[in-house]
Amino acid sequence: MPNLAQNLSGDTWRIGQREFRSRLVLGTGKYPDFETMRKAHEISGTEMVTVAIRRVNLSDKSQPSLLDFIDKKKITLLPNTAGCYTVKDAILTAELAREALQTDLVKLEVIGDEKTLFPDGPGTLEAAAELIKRKFIVMPYITDDPIACKRLEEMGCPVIMPLAAPIGSGLGIRNPYNLRIIIEQAKIPVIVDAGVGTASDAALAMELGVTALLMNTAVACAKEPMMMAEAMKFATEAGRMAFLAGRIPKKLYATASSPIEGVIGSG
Protein backbone atom coordinates (compact mmCIF):
# COMPACT_ATOMS: atom_id res chain seq x y z
CA MET A 1 0.00 0.00 0.00
CA PRO A 2 1.50 3.39 -0.94
CA ASN A 3 2.44 5.83 1.80
CA LEU A 4 -0.09 8.60 1.34
CA ALA A 5 2.13 10.98 3.33
CA GLN A 6 4.42 11.01 0.30
CA ASN A 7 1.71 12.99 -1.48
CA LEU A 8 2.59 15.92 0.76
CA SER A 9 5.93 16.26 -1.02
CA GLY A 10 4.20 18.38 -3.66
CA ASP A 11 2.04 20.24 -1.14
CA THR A 12 4.05 23.45 -0.89
CA TRP A 13 3.38 27.00 0.25
CA ARG A 14 5.03 30.31 -0.56
CA ILE A 15 6.18 33.61 0.86
CA GLY A 16 6.92 35.81 -2.13
CA GLN A 17 9.44 33.94 -4.27
CA ARG A 18 10.34 31.50 -1.49
CA GLU A 19 8.74 28.06 -1.60
CA PHE A 20 8.53 25.70 1.37
CA ARG A 21 7.55 22.07 1.85
CA SER A 22 7.74 21.93 5.63
CA ARG A 23 4.85 23.63 7.40
CA LEU A 24 6.69 23.77 10.71
CA VAL A 25 8.69 26.90 11.58
CA LEU A 26 10.84 26.75 14.69
CA GLY A 27 12.56 29.27 16.94
CA THR A 28 16.12 29.43 18.22
CA GLY A 29 15.74 30.52 21.84
CA LYS A 30 15.54 28.68 25.18
CA TYR A 31 17.31 25.50 24.07
CA PRO A 32 19.73 23.95 26.59
CA ASP A 33 22.56 24.55 24.12
CA PHE A 34 23.18 25.34 20.45
CA GLU A 35 23.87 21.72 19.50
CA THR A 36 20.50 20.59 20.87
CA MET A 37 18.89 23.38 18.86
CA ARG A 38 20.67 22.25 15.70
CA LYS A 39 19.59 18.64 16.15
CA ALA A 40 15.99 19.64 16.90
CA HIS A 41 15.88 21.74 13.72
CA GLU A 42 17.29 18.86 11.70
CA ILE A 43 14.91 16.19 12.99
CA SER A 44 11.88 18.48 12.63
CA GLY A 45 12.53 19.00 8.92
CA THR A 46 11.96 22.74 9.33
CA GLU A 47 12.97 24.99 6.44
CA MET A 48 12.65 28.28 8.31
CA VAL A 49 13.72 29.39 11.78
CA THR A 50 13.09 32.67 13.50
CA VAL A 51 15.97 34.56 15.10
CA ALA A 52 15.72 37.33 17.69
CA ILE A 53 18.27 39.75 16.27
CA ARG A 54 18.79 41.40 19.68
CA ARG A 55 20.01 38.07 21.08
CA VAL A 56 22.43 37.19 18.29
CA ASN A 57 26.16 37.64 18.86
CA LEU A 58 27.21 39.70 15.85
CA SER A 59 30.27 41.46 17.27
CA ASP A 60 32.44 39.11 19.34
CA LYS A 61 33.76 36.61 16.80
CA SER A 62 35.65 34.75 19.52
CA GLN A 63 32.38 33.57 21.06
CA PRO A 64 29.97 31.03 19.51
CA SER A 65 26.88 32.33 17.76
CA LEU A 66 23.63 30.49 17.20
CA LEU A 67 24.01 31.36 13.51
CA ASP A 68 26.95 28.94 13.40
CA PHE A 69 24.55 26.12 14.27
CA ILE A 70 21.99 26.78 11.51
CA ASP A 71 22.38 25.15 8.11
CA LYS A 72 21.66 28.21 6.00
CA LYS A 73 21.77 26.13 2.80
CA LYS A 74 18.62 24.33 3.94
CA ILE A 75 17.03 26.77 6.37
CA THR A 76 15.75 30.30 5.72
CA LEU A 77 16.49 32.81 8.47
CA LEU A 78 13.50 34.82 9.68
CA PRO A 79 14.73 37.66 11.93
CA ASN A 80 12.19 38.97 14.39
CA THR A 81 11.74 42.11 16.43
CA ALA A 82 11.21 40.28 19.73
CA GLY A 83 11.46 42.51 22.77
CA CYS A 84 10.30 45.66 20.98
CA TYR A 85 7.59 47.64 22.76
CA THR A 86 7.47 50.63 20.42
CA VAL A 87 7.06 51.14 16.70
CA LYS A 88 10.38 53.00 16.59
CA ASP A 89 12.29 50.12 18.20
CA ALA A 90 10.67 47.54 15.93
CA ILE A 91 11.61 49.47 12.80
CA LEU A 92 15.17 50.01 14.00
CA THR A 93 15.56 46.32 14.86
CA ALA A 94 14.23 45.31 11.45
CA GLU A 95 16.76 47.57 9.75
CA LEU A 96 19.59 46.11 11.86
CA ALA A 97 18.46 42.60 10.94
CA ARG A 98 18.40 43.40 7.24
CA GLU A 99 21.91 44.79 7.42
CA ALA A 100 23.30 41.94 9.52
CA LEU A 101 21.58 38.97 7.89
CA GLN A 102 21.08 40.29 4.35
CA THR A 103 17.38 39.50 4.20
CA ASP A 104 14.22 41.53 3.67
CA LEU A 105 12.15 39.03 5.67
CA VAL A 106 11.07 40.15 9.12
CA LYS A 107 8.73 38.72 11.69
CA LEU A 108 7.22 41.86 13.14
CA GLU A 109 6.54 41.94 16.87
CA VAL A 110 5.40 45.09 18.66
CA ILE A 111 4.56 43.99 22.18
CA GLY A 112 1.84 45.84 24.03
CA ASP A 113 2.01 44.32 27.50
CA GLU A 114 4.98 42.98 29.45
CA LYS A 115 2.99 40.42 31.45
CA THR A 116 0.96 38.77 28.70
CA LEU A 117 3.25 39.65 25.77
CA PHE A 118 0.16 40.28 23.68
CA PRO A 119 0.91 42.31 20.56
CA ASP A 120 0.07 45.99 20.35
CA GLY A 121 -2.53 45.98 17.56
CA PRO A 122 -2.37 49.65 16.48
CA GLY A 123 1.41 49.66 16.88
CA THR A 124 1.74 46.54 14.74
CA LEU A 125 -0.37 48.08 11.98
CA GLU A 126 1.67 51.29 12.08
CA ALA A 127 5.01 49.49 12.04
CA ALA A 128 3.89 47.12 9.28
CA ALA A 129 2.86 50.02 7.04
CA GLU A 130 6.23 51.73 7.50
CA LEU A 131 8.27 48.55 6.95
CA ILE A 132 6.33 47.75 3.79
CA LYS A 133 7.24 51.23 2.51
CA ARG A 134 10.86 50.32 3.21
CA LYS A 135 10.53 47.19 1.05
CA PHE A 136 10.49 44.63 3.85
CA ILE A 137 8.60 41.36 3.53
CA VAL A 138 6.56 41.74 6.72
CA MET A 139 5.22 38.74 8.62
CA PRO A 140 3.25 40.27 11.52
CA TYR A 141 2.57 38.62 14.87
CA ILE A 142 -0.94 39.71 15.85
CA THR A 143 -3.87 38.74 18.05
CA ASP A 144 -6.53 36.37 16.68
CA ASP A 145 -8.58 39.39 15.60
CA PRO A 146 -10.09 38.86 12.13
CA ILE A 147 -10.33 42.60 11.49
CA ALA A 148 -6.70 43.32 12.34
CA CYS A 149 -5.62 40.36 10.22
CA LYS A 150 -7.65 41.65 7.28
CA ARG A 151 -6.14 45.13 7.61
CA LEU A 152 -2.62 43.68 7.57
CA GLU A 153 -3.40 41.67 4.45
CA GLU A 154 -4.90 44.70 2.71
CA MET A 155 -1.82 46.85 3.40
CA GLY A 156 0.44 44.29 1.74
CA CYS A 157 1.65 41.73 4.28
CA PRO A 158 2.21 38.43 2.42
CA VAL A 159 1.51 36.40 5.59
CA ILE A 160 -0.46 36.90 8.79
CA MET A 161 0.51 35.27 12.07
CA PRO A 162 -2.29 35.22 14.65
CA LEU A 163 -1.53 33.80 18.08
CA ALA A 164 -3.19 30.66 19.41
CA ALA A 165 -2.48 31.62 23.03
CA PRO A 166 0.05 33.83 24.86
CA ILE A 167 3.71 33.31 23.95
CA GLY A 168 5.23 30.38 25.81
CA SER A 169 1.98 29.51 27.60
CA GLY A 170 1.48 26.11 25.96
CA LEU A 171 -2.29 26.56 26.31
CA GLY A 172 -3.02 25.41 22.77
CA ILE A 173 -5.79 26.73 20.52
CA ARG A 174 -7.90 28.98 22.74
CA ASN A 175 -10.23 30.36 20.08
CA PRO A 176 -10.61 28.03 17.09
CA TYR A 177 -13.64 29.99 15.89
CA ASN A 178 -11.73 33.23 15.35
CA LEU A 179 -8.97 31.28 13.60
CA ARG A 180 -11.55 29.72 11.27
CA ILE A 181 -12.85 33.18 10.35
CA ILE A 182 -9.30 34.44 9.75
CA ILE A 183 -8.51 31.42 7.55
CA GLU A 184 -11.74 31.70 5.56
CA GLN A 185 -11.30 35.39 4.76
CA ALA A 186 -7.55 35.35 4.08
CA LYS A 187 -6.11 35.10 0.58
CA ILE A 188 -2.57 34.79 1.96
CA PRO A 189 -0.91 32.17 4.19
CA VAL A 190 -2.01 32.05 7.82
CA ILE A 191 0.64 30.89 10.31
CA VAL A 192 -0.41 30.16 13.88
CA ASP A 193 2.23 31.74 16.08
CA ALA A 194 2.54 31.21 19.85
CA GLY A 195 0.70 29.03 22.33
CA VAL A 196 1.17 25.54 20.90
CA GLY A 197 2.19 23.24 23.75
CA THR A 198 2.22 19.71 22.41
CA ALA A 199 1.65 17.60 19.32
CA SER A 200 -2.14 17.46 19.65
CA ASP A 201 -2.25 21.28 19.60
CA ALA A 202 -0.24 21.29 16.37
CA ALA A 203 -2.51 18.71 14.75
CA LEU A 204 -5.64 20.64 15.75
CA ALA A 205 -4.32 23.89 14.31
CA MET A 206 -3.45 22.21 11.02
CA GLU A 207 -6.85 20.49 10.89
CA LEU A 208 -8.45 23.94 11.05
CA GLY A 209 -6.68 24.75 7.78
CA VAL A 210 -3.83 27.05 8.80
CA THR A 211 -0.94 27.15 6.36
CA ALA A 212 1.84 26.52 8.86
CA LEU A 213 2.83 26.69 12.52
CA LEU A 214 5.54 28.65 14.32
CA MET A 215 6.67 27.43 17.71
CA ASN A 216 9.66 27.69 20.01
CA THR A 217 9.02 27.02 23.70
CA ALA A 218 7.06 23.82 23.13
CA VAL A 219 10.12 22.22 21.54
CA ALA A 220 13.02 24.03 23.20
CA CYS A 221 11.71 23.60 26.75
CA ALA A 222 10.42 20.05 26.41
CA LYS A 223 12.14 17.44 28.56
CA GLU A 224 13.40 15.88 25.33
CA PRO A 225 13.57 18.68 22.71
CA MET A 226 14.60 16.42 19.82
CA MET A 227 11.82 13.95 20.52
CA MET A 228 9.29 16.77 20.73
CA ALA A 229 10.63 18.26 17.49
CA GLU A 230 9.95 14.98 15.73
CA ALA A 231 6.51 14.69 17.36
CA MET A 232 5.65 18.18 16.10
CA LYS A 233 6.80 17.23 12.62
CA PHE A 234 4.50 14.20 12.55
CA ALA A 235 1.60 16.13 14.12
CA THR A 236 1.91 18.94 11.59
CA GLU A 237 1.89 16.47 8.71
CA ALA A 238 -0.99 14.45 10.17
CA GLY A 239 -3.08 17.56 10.76
CA ARG A 240 -2.43 18.74 7.21
CA MET A 241 -3.41 15.35 5.77
CA ALA A 242 -6.59 15.29 7.87
CA PHE A 243 -7.50 18.77 6.62
CA LEU A 244 -6.96 17.76 3.00
CA ALA A 245 -8.86 14.49 3.50
CA GLY A 246 -11.90 16.30 4.90
CA ARG A 247 -13.36 15.25 8.24
CA ILE A 248 -16.92 13.95 8.65
CA PRO A 249 -19.55 16.35 9.99
CA LYS A 250 -20.16 16.31 13.73
CA LYS A 251 -23.56 14.90 14.72
CA LEU A 252 -25.44 14.72 17.98
CA TYR A 253 -26.71 11.18 17.45
CA ALA A 254 -25.16 7.96 16.21
CA THR A 255 -25.02 6.93 12.56
CA ALA A 256 -24.71 3.21 11.88
CA SER A 257 -21.30 2.27 10.51
CA SER A 258 -22.88 -0.66 8.63
CA PRO A 259 -26.04 0.46 6.78
CA ILE A 260 -28.91 -2.03 6.97
CA GLU A 261 -30.50 -1.09 3.64
CA GLY A 262 -30.47 -4.10 1.37
CA VAL A 263 -29.78 -6.58 4.17
CA ILE A 264 -31.94 -9.73 3.94
CA GLY A 265 -34.84 -9.52 6.34
CA SER A 266 -34.60 -5.77 6.78
CA GLY A 267 -37.60 -5.04 4.60
Image (cartoon, rainbow, N blue to C red):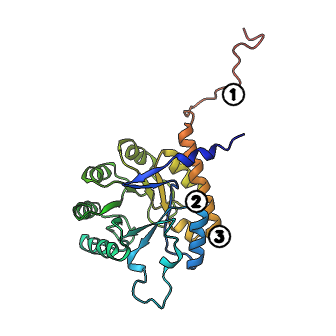
Residue drawn at x 48%, y 82% is: 65
**Helix, strand or loop under label 1:** loop
Q: Is 174 left, or right, of 40 in this rendering?
A: left
Instruction: Find out whether the residues at labels 1 and 2 contact each other: C-beta distance under 8 Å.
Output: no
Q: Amino acid at mark 3?
A: Glu
Pair 3/2: label in front: 3
Disc 3/disc 2 C-alpha distance (Å): 12 Å
- Is the residue 225 above or below the residue 152 in the image? below
The image shows residue 153, relative to residue 92, as above or below, that is above
Q: Name the residue rendered at 55%, 54% in the picture.
A: 201
Q: Which mark is residue 257?
A: 1
CB-based contact (under 8 Å), mark 3 and mark 2: no
Q: Secondary structure at mark 2?
A: loop
Query: Badge 2 is on which residue?
Result: 198
Report how far apart the C-alphas of labels 1 and 2 lie in the structure: 32 Å
Image coords of residue 259 (percent x, y): 69, 21
Local crowd size for mark 2, using a 10 Å CA cut-off: few (<14), some (14–19), many (≥20):
some
Rounded to the nearest angstrom, the CA distance separating label 3 from label 1 is 40 Å
Three-letter residue code for mark 2: Thr
Q: Is residue 39 left or right of residue 191?
A: right
Q: Quadrant of residue 127?
A: bottom left
Reply above or below: 37 against 58: above
Q: Secondary structure at mark 3?
A: loop
Crowding at mark 1 (Cα within 10 Å: few <14, some 14-19, many 20+): few
Relative image position of residue 135 (x, y in whole percent): 26, 63
> Which quarter of the rendered picture does the N terminus lie within?
top right
Marks 3 and 2, the one that precedes in the sequence: 2
Please name the residue that numbered disc 3 is placed on.
224
